[in-house]
Every structure is written in structure tokens, then in C-alpha cells.
Amino acid sequence: MLLSQKGEHISFHTPGHKRAGADITELSYSDNLYAPRGVLARAEEDAAGILGAARSFFLTDGSTAGVFSMIFAVKAAGAKKIAAPVFSHPSVFHACEAMGMEIVSIGQRVRCGIAMQPQKEEIASALKEADALLLTSPDYYGFFAPMAAARELCDGEHKPLLLDGAHGSHLHFCTEYGGKFADMWVDGVHKSLPAMTQGAVVSANGKWAEHLLRGVRTFRTTSPSYPIMASVEYAVKYPRNEAIEEASEAFKRRHGCLKNDDWSKIVVAFGEKSGAAQAALEAQGVFPEFNDGNYLMFYLSPCTKGEELEKLGSLLEKLPRGEVREDAQAGGIPIYREGL
Ligand SMILES: Cc1ncc(COP(=O)(O)O)c(C=O)c1O
């Protein structure tokens, strides 16, 4: 039964705020994410169909829970070592530490403070020493990992390929979508599609679905937020917005932005003037995703409006750009680097 069809709702159930509305719990009609058979099962099946997976699992604890679940799954299948780029997200390191999984580091070159995606040869040599491979694609700066080459390498060695797609869920319409190459992958739906913060999906194909199910049951909350779950379903089903994709690519060419692979990430070099540029933009109500001390990054989604992009463009034209610091350290943005 739809919530809107229900009449009076007197809550003798959690959550403790006791207010009827979307923030409910597992009730007779609202299914149970731990073992879904109703509306949640149907929503997850729809998501799997859209994302090209055998099984997809909703997450209300961010991509972090998906990374933990994928690493649990490969460990459950006997893996002891996982090859991963040195600048992977902290969740990769924390999951490996928690599960006693050894990391075989894949080196990444750093250019002007940006950790470049590893090359096929670097991945190949690390993979020889490991039982599984984990890549991140796209990364925060909008670069794709060499997923087709990684798939080939993993097939050759009969090892699973995991993908941290925390920044790539909007790409599921495209041939470059990382999920097309991986055995298990996480989509950070809340970052690049219209889902509430923490909404994500982790998916698997083949035999990995069973292992991943055990992983999500281990790491997901047993009190998932219904508003977040509803927003995840909405976001995965959200239509492609080719107009904004094209506008973004045209914008990048017009405004001399970094040449990257992902339309949703606009990266502009300001060098030592990045702080002043950020302040000037914010004074006009325009907030970038981050400032790494060299670049400002603007995160788009299918919900970005053309006129917002135009406003950004007209402001950028007036802002002086400085010299990019070529010797900048990688990882200048994510504050969580400090915690590693
Ligand atoms: C590459 C990457 N992976 C994983 C995560 C974790 O995602 P979440 O914050 O949704 O748990 C992030 C978050 O920023 C990320 O950048």
C-alpha cells in the first residue's frame, strides 16, 4: 500500500520522533532491507536491471559500506591480498585493515597535485602479487581508470575486479560505465545523481552476488533510512540529461578547464589564486565542490541547470588565474588524508 493511501497513522514503532511521514521503519507494508520481499525487493531488482547487475543492494551508509562489503566478499572467497592504487579512498584502507587483507599498492604518478590513474602495466605487475583488483573510476577529478584493460588482466589471471564508483553512478547510460567491466562495483548515487546524502548502491555479477549479500548484511545498518532508500530508487531511475552533458563539455572547452573524461566534473586551474577565486565565487552564491590549492572543482549532475552553468561561466571570465603549482602534493583536498 502506498503511504499516501493510508489514513491516520499512530506510531507505536520506531523512530522515536513518532511523526508519521516518510521516515518510517520496517512495517507490515514497508518491507525489510535485510531480507526484502516486497517494495524494496522490487526497487533493488529494478536498480539491478538499470545498472546491468545480477543483484544490486541499496545502501544508506554511503559508498563506504559498499567498499567494505565488496572487500568482505572477496575475502569470503579466499582472497588475502588486494591490489589498489595508493591514492584510493580511505574506506579501502580501513576495510582492508579491519578484515586483515593485505594491500598491494599500485603506484600513481602525481601531476600538479592530481594523482593520475594507474596505467595498464602498473596494474598488471601489482595484480600478479594479489588475489583481486580494486580501481576507482571516475576519480574526483573526472579521470577514468583503464577499465577494459583491467578486465582483460583480471580475466587472464582469473581474479575479480572491484570498482569504487563513488563518483560514477551518472554514467550508467554510457559505454564507459565502470559497472560494465567489474565483478562488483559501488555506485555513489548521492554524489552525482539526485539522491539524498549517503544513498548508494553496491552491485555484483556472477557468483559474486552471493558473497556480496553476506557483505552487505555484515556492514549495512539494520535501520536503513526510508527517505534515503526512496531517493536511491528515484535517482537510479532519473533520466539522462544529455543537454547538460553537452553544455558541460562545451563549457570546459570555452573556459580552458582541465581536459578530463567525465562531463560531471569541471576542474579549473587557479594556482595560487584559487583561494581568492573561491571566495569571489562564494560571495556570489556559487559554491565549488573543493579547492585543492591549485584547482577549483565544480560537481555537476543531471539536475544542474543550464543557467547555473552560464552564471558560473560569466563569473569565471572575470576571475584572474594564477600559475599552477606543479610540485603540489596529491591529496590536497580530502581532509581524510590526514587521518591515514
Ligand atoms: C573515491 C571515493 N570512494 C568512496 C567514497 C566514500 O563514499 P561515501 O562518502 O558515500 O561513503 C568517497 C567519498 O568521498 C570517494 O571519494
Image (cartoon, helix red, strand yellow):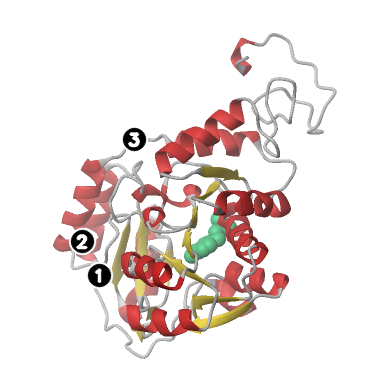
Asked if one can make out residue 14 in the rendered structure from this viewpoint, the answer is yes
**Label for residue 282?**
none
Q: Earlier in the sequence, mark 2 or mark 1?
A: 2
Point out residue 326 in the picture as x, y percentages from the top left corner. Answer: 32, 88
> Which residue is the extreme one toward the right?
12
Q: CA distance from mark 3 to mark 2?
A: 23 Å
Q: Which residue is mark 2?
A: 252
Q: CA distance from mark 1 to mark 3?
A: 27 Å
**Res. 258 mark:** 1
Q: To which quarter of the image does residue 142 belong?
A: bottom left
Q: Give me the residue at 29% from left, 83% from top.
A: 324
**Image location of residue 330, percent across then percent down:** 44, 82
**Above or below 337: residue 316:** above
Where on the picture, by quarter, is residue 130? bottom right
Residue sitting nearer the eye, 290 or 241: 241
Residue 10 drawn above or below residue 26: above
If you read the primary sequence from the N terminus, does the residue marked by circle 1 or circle 3 appear first? 3
Of labels 1 and 3, the one closer to you: 3
Mark 1, secondary structure of its residue: loop
Q: Residues within 10 Å of mark 2 (few under 14, many from 20)?
A: many
Crowding at dot 1, Cα within 10 Å, few <14 / some 14-19 / many 20+, comes out as some
Mark 3: secondary structure = loop
